[in-house]
Structure formats: C-alpha cells, structure tokens
Image: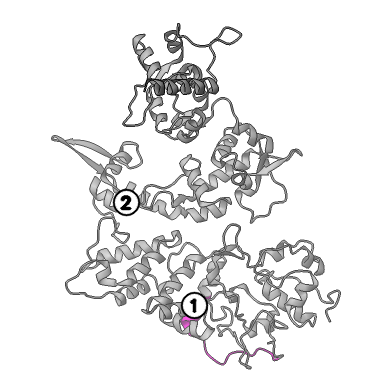
Amino acid sequence: MIPRRLLVRPSIQAAEPLNQFLQRASGLNRLRSPTELLALAGLPSLAPWRRCDLSALASLLHMDDPGSLEAAAYWPRPGTLRTVAFGQVDVPSWAVNFSRSRICPACVLEAGSGQRIWDLCAVTACPNHCTPLVDACTCGRPLSFHRPSLAICRCGRSVEASTAVSTGQTIATAQALAALARGIRPAGVAPVASLTGALRLLRFGMAAGDVEATSRRSATISKPDVATVAARLEMSADILLDWPGGLHRLLAENARDTPGKVGLEATFGTFIQRLRAALSEPDLVPIADEVRNWLGARDDAPVMKAWSFFRPRTVAAPRLTARQAADLLSMASTRIVALVQDGSLAGGILPMGRRRAVLVEPGSVKRLLAERLSLVTASTAAAALGASRKQIGALGRRGLLCPPGLSGEPSGRSYRRPSVEALAARLSSLARPPTGEALVRLLEVPALRRIRLPDLIASVLAGEVPLVAVPETGPGTPILGRYAVAVDDTYRLRHRPDGAALGAARAAGRLGLSQRMIPVLVRAGCLDQAGAAEGHTVRGVTAASVQEFPRRYVLASVVARSWGTSTRAIAARFARAGLKPVVATDSARGISAVWSAEAAERALEGLDIPLDRTGTRCRRSSRERSVKRQTSVEGRRVRA
C-alpha cells in the first residue's frame, strides 16, 4: 500500500540525476520502486526522461523550488529528441544509458547517493574509487530503474562490488569525461571543444576496428554491458587520452596499399567515409585538422582532389596565390578575388603583364580557417532559437543570421555562433514588460501563416513593432519563446500600405498576370524594385508600385474586355493612333503588351461604345455579347 505522505524527505545532491534520486528516496521510505513515488505525486513512470510538471513531486518532498529536480532530469532539449540535458551541458541521447543502470557500491555506501557520470555509456569505472561500475546483480538481473533502492536489486539482494579490476584506460577515460562534464579539459587529451566532442570521438574509436556493420552496432548503438564496453575502451581509448599519438596509430592501422588504385578510398576503404561523417561536427574541427596534417606529412600521401574534406590545409608559403588560397579554403579562385577586394582577406591584386596576380597573406587564410571553430549547424541554431531549419535559412537570407560562406561548408548548413548570440542580445535589449494586451510568441508566428517570421523580426529590430518579454520562462526556453508581440501588430504588418515588399509570385497574383511578367515590368519601369538595403530579394517589388500599376498602365486584354471588343481591334486602334506600347508583345515568351493608361484613353476617344445613364462608356453585358454572337452565327447560316 502506498503511503499518503513521505516519512523521509531527502534533498537532491548537486551531481545526482533525477532517476537515481528517486531510487534513493523510494528506498528511504520503504517503497517497492520509484514508480510508486511518482504515482504518489501523480506523475508517469517516465518522468526522469520526458518533460513534465514536477511541482507536485517537489511539494511532496517539501522542496521550495522544483527547478533543482528539473535540472537533474535527462529531458530532451526543446525542438529536438537527439540532445538531452546532462547537468550544465548537453550530450547526445545515444551517449546516456537509460535502460541499464550502473552504480559504484563504494560511493553509495560512503555518500548514500549516486552520480550523474555513471549513466554515460562510455564510463565503466568509478572516477573516485577506480573500481568497475556494477550494472547487474548476483542473481543475473540487470539493474533497472524499477528497483527498490539505489543499491538493492528487484530480487531484494544488495548490489555487491565487482571482483574485476579496472584497467588504466577505463579509469583514465572515466576521469577525463568527468572533468569535461565540469567544463575542464585535462592535459594530454584530444582538443575537443566539449563533452559531446569527446563522446563522439570515443564512439568512433570503439567502432573503428569493426568491419562488419553488425559488430559496429553492438559496439555503440545497442548500449552493451559494462564488461563489453570496458574491453572496447581498452583498445580504443587512446584516440582521446593519448593525443595525437592515439589518432596517428588508428590512422596507420587502417591504411592499406591497393595496387592499381589511388585515392583516399583506395588507401582507407570505408574507414575514411565513417571518419568523414564523424568529423563533420563543429566540436571535432581540431581533430579533422590533425588528420589533414597527418595525411599531408606522409611520404606516401594519398592523392586527393582540391575540394576534398581531408586535403591538408597547412599554410607555409610567405604569400599565397589565389589558387593556393582557394585550395586551402575549398572555394573557387574568383571567390578569393572578391574576398581580397572587399577586405575579407589581406592581400593585393597586382598587374603582371596582360594578366593580374592575386597574392594573399597566409595569416588571413588561417584566420578564416579558425572561424570554423565558432560554427554551429543549422539544427543547433534552430534548437537554440526554437525555429525550424527552414526558418533558420530564411533568417540567414534576410541577413538576420550570418552564414559562414568561407570555410568550405555548404551554404545554409552552418552559421556563426556569435550571430545567434548577437540576435538574442538585440532582442533582449528591445524587450519591455507586458502591458496586458493580447500577445503571440515569436515561436508561434510561423503557425499563424499570415506573416513571415523574418519580416516580423526585422520590423522588431527596426523599432517598428514593440517587443514584449514573456514572463515565467525558464533557462531551457528557446530564444524565440521568451519574447512576444501584440496580435494586432501581426495584422498591421501584413497589410502595411507603404514600404512593404512583394515577391514576384505575390505581385503577379495581385495584378492578375503571369509571374514571368514581373521582371519585364521592373525593367520597363512600370514597377519599382525593392531596395537591397531593405533585405528583399532581387525580384521583389514594392507594394505601392503594385497598387499604382492599374491606374498608370493598361493591357490590351483588359481594354478589350472593358470595351466589349477583341484584343486585335484594340491593338489596331492604338497603332492607327501612333501609340507605342511601354512593353512590346512577345508571344514566344508569353509577354503581353502594356500601354500607358492616359495615352490609351486618348486613343480610344470616338469609338462607338454604349453609354450608361451618366453618359460614360460602359461595358457590354454578357447577354448582349451572347446575342451578338448568335446573330452573327444565324447570318452565316442564312448566307450558306
């Protein structure tokens, strides 16, 4: 029977995850499993891993703030299921062992609580006691979340310490990962940017020696037991712990000589493809640079194309030509010339006979290569902002986020981290407290489908729309979820009479023309092109010019329908009057003729057109035209 209240109300420790805390609390209160404790608070059994409201659990434990419980949970970050919170850092979900618990009996006996670092799949030894972690009971059952207490199995036996001995590799790996989790990089380890980078590197090293796909899956994806992981770490942990010797040995072991073939795949086989996929993350950029240096220093270096990801990018010449700089930066030589002209690269363009020589300073090339360390993927930027990857691309095209475009990464897939932080800082400086009006979060704007998110953010940054700070938002809330605008402002921006820009499709829809007519009308001066300084595309036009177009210009088809005659008759009338079109007809391209409305009115003076009661010309009704057609048909039949 579940008690109505808890007799023992423990407090959560700093390095203790929520699942281990619940196991400890259920054991102190003599409950059968943490599920009973969660049921007492009205929470599901997956609360440690799925986001939910923990205020009832905090009230049950007499805790003032449920934030400490939320910070200890392995909850996915908003907008993604591949990244989970791990204390103060984020790690991939595959790096955490959710199904098979691990503990150090000595730590539980001394401190009475667990540690978050035990739940990492790559940790098989206790960083403090240097003993193997235990993930199974002597009865043979693996330790699950649904056991009575932290050190008691579901069978009722106490979890005993392992009789095995941890090796130096597993102990050093556990201590290095524990230090990285605290934000400290130990000396001698690989220069990874974060704990996530170290986990990715270890994961690749553990699977690098397996040729068969099934064995690679058992090494990483299936999350094996402690003994299996420890055996694999013994062979592959040097890639993280012994820098750069461990990486060099791994590359040398996988290199082979294939007679009659050249290239990276001929030398390394599928290993180079898996290495390329592993090193594509921004956290492992220094590792990729070390691989390039190792390949370039070999006497039998494999033949690589200029745009290869592994092409050595060392800069040793006093001054580089445009081709050399282009090879290092993986871009075209013409792009190097443009970068030198706009000052992004230090150098000069000097005359050399009838040609020109482009010389680039190596230091500026190194600086651009170093900028890759600050890049984040579009998925990471989308998770931070709380938007989709499509919206991130739209923000980049609008100039609100700065894509790199210099380091060889495909455009639109990576962004500079400072640009994301700068956008967040600008929004924070413009936000004001709420005033009680109806609000809509920036996070919810794309779902409204009446205004584009980049247009709204640009209006906010320009000071045209007030920004409101949303109260009661936690630290895990995305950037766009922290701010809102008035609902009325979204309608006002959609129907702005002046200054708005329309794309070619929208402008053509308002004018009743085909989309191919819009560039022709812009070149003829009938429509005004939206300025590039306003952030619009080249084929965008102003809404004011679209609204003014029907009053200034007219098409032959429109005049023919209004006067109840044919297009050929109208064109012939204009030709006899000497009226020249603003846009000439081009039937091959589907371009209709356009005339000045004022000149067309003068040319049509004197035509025999029915008049309405006010004395102005009126359009023949559809019935009159139908009667006229029937009369002409009957006349032809009589003559026949």
Q: Quadrant of residue 314?
A: bottom left
Going by the numbered disc 2, the residue's amino acid type is Leu
Report the span colored magenta.
Answer: 157-174
Q: Nearer the viewer, residue 358 or 507?
A: 507
Q: In this rendering, does residue 244 appear at all? A: yes
Q: Considering only vertical position in the picture, is 591 above or below 573?
A: below
Q: Is residue 347 above or below residue 208?
A: above
Q: Which corner quadrant holds the N terminus?
A: bottom right
Q: Residue shown at 70%/83% (left/top)?
A: 147
- 318 horizontally vs 365: left or right: left
Q: Who's the residue at 50% across and 72% down the image?
A: 176
- Report x, y in % for residue 229: 49, 81
Within 10 Å of disc 1 (Cα), the crowding (few <14, some 14-19, many 20+) is: some
Look at the picture and state if 537 lies above or below 546. below
- Viewer-side residue, 188 vs 581: 581
Main SS, magenta residues: loop
